[in-house]
Amino acid sequence: MIGLLPKTLSGRTVVLLVSGLVATHIVTLLVLSEDRVESLTRTEEQHIAQHIASIANIVSNVPNEWRDRIVRSSDGHLFNVRITETGSRKTLQSTGTNTSTLGDLLLRQVRPSTNEPISVDISDADPGNMTPGRDSWRRWLESRLSRLAYGHDRDQAVLVSIPLSEGQRLSFSTSMPMASAPGWERQLAVTGAFLVIVLMLSLWAIRKMSSPLALFANAATTFARNVYAPSLPETGPSEVREAARAFNNMQKRVLQMIEGRAYMLGAISHDLRTPLTTIRLRAEDLADSEARRRILASIEEMDTMLASTLTFAREGTAQEELQATDIGSLLEAICSDFSDTGHDVTLAVSSTIVAACRPLALKRALSNLIDNALKYGERADVAANVTGGLVDITITDQGPGVPNEELERIFQPFYRLENSRNRNTGGMGLGLAIAQMAVHMHGGSIQLENRAETSGLCVRLMLPIGTCGNNDESSRNHRSH
């Protein structure tokens, strides 16, 4: 049953609310219909009791030779009156629930000539059917639903026997029509109008209540891309205002933590570069020797480590604005720079792709990925196109690839597959982490997978195209060496 409900919170709330209200409406119609039928039935019983009492009182007070003539004149097609012998009277089992009401009415209006009781039998059978079936809760429910759907029930047979004298009784046989309820057309119209009104009000109320959730989701997504995103407006009901205030406080705390980390690393970098500069100057005064070269190499490596660490720390706090950027031209500039230094790089762009991005951050990420491919795979093949409204950029190499168990861990800061501390081989372990941070800042994704058909690694970036254009009339294929 739960699997049939909609997936969204607003959809489930509307379905449950409308279902409950419709069920309540149907029960209310049943109760009102039953009350209406009961009221009209009492009126019909009073009419029958008055008619029977009038005839019985007249027959009881006239001479015996007049009785047959009065009975024949009172007998009709829908209201039968006859004089019967007491021994031939057939007794019915009462199946109705209102026999006592009709009997009480007759006792108040009829004065029998003998002490014999007045017999009243009411059943759901036709007047000529003397053996009605037994009533049950299922039959009661079916009759009420039938009355609600079709607007009528079967007539009830009413048999009344009033004693006249010793051995004679005055018998009445008639039918009491059940009070008809409105037909299914009217019920359907009422229920349909009720459902439309409830559905419209429910959709409006649920949309008003669920809109803060969408606002929070959008704010969280924006905050994940840019820590300097605007704060949420603290408006609406008290619960929404408190949640917005808590979210804004969290955003401020995270921003303070990130800025504090960047400030701390910047201070450390500044403080360390002063003694490093002093050491470099003193090392350059040394005679040309192997020790001098090693000292200068160590200083250069430390300086590179400080620069890489500072770049990683500042990457998440960059406030670069989004700009409409030609992705093909950006890739072409990056590949040309690598090609000018003697690296083997190819570029293929299927069409002109203009996307809203942060050019410097994206350029830094793509440069790190291409540099990683060239460093470990000898060459880099770069391709870009638009797939399903996303900018799809792939960078493949011809290196040994990465063990499958390391594909996720390779994005961790300072994690390196190559264990040496040589910056020309192992690097600082921050290139992929910086690239992943920049891609996530754009709301995109980055995946690494080993190429099954050939050796090497394939890096795939999927970036939202944003406000961009895609011109299929022009295409470019670049190959740089």
Image (spheres, grey):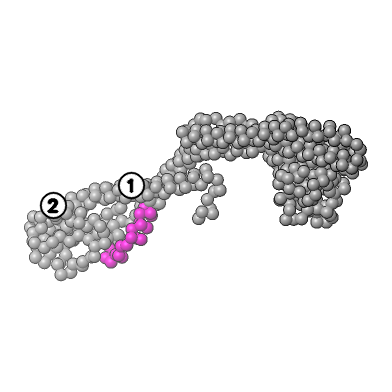
Circle nearer the N terminus (1, 2): 1
Residue 316, image quadrant? top right
> Where is residue 125 drawn, in percent x and y?
30, 61
Helix, strand or loop under label 2: helix
- Going by the image, does 415 lie left or right of 181? right
Residue at (78, 34) in percent of width and height: 276
- For the residue pair 467 and 50, the one nearer the viewer reads as 467
Please name the residue that numbered disc 2 is placed on.
108
Please name the residue that numbered disc 1 is placed on.
32
- Going by the image, does 160 lie left or right of 236? left
Residue at (71, 44) in percent of width and height: 413
Measured in 3D between alpha carbons, the distance from the residue under mark 1 to the one under mark 2, in whole angstroms, is 30 Å
> Where is residue 110 drawn, in percent x and y?
12, 54
What are the residue bounds of the magenta stretch? 126-147
Residue 224, image quadrant? top right
Report the number of numbered marks: 2
Q: Amino acid at mark 1?
A: Leu
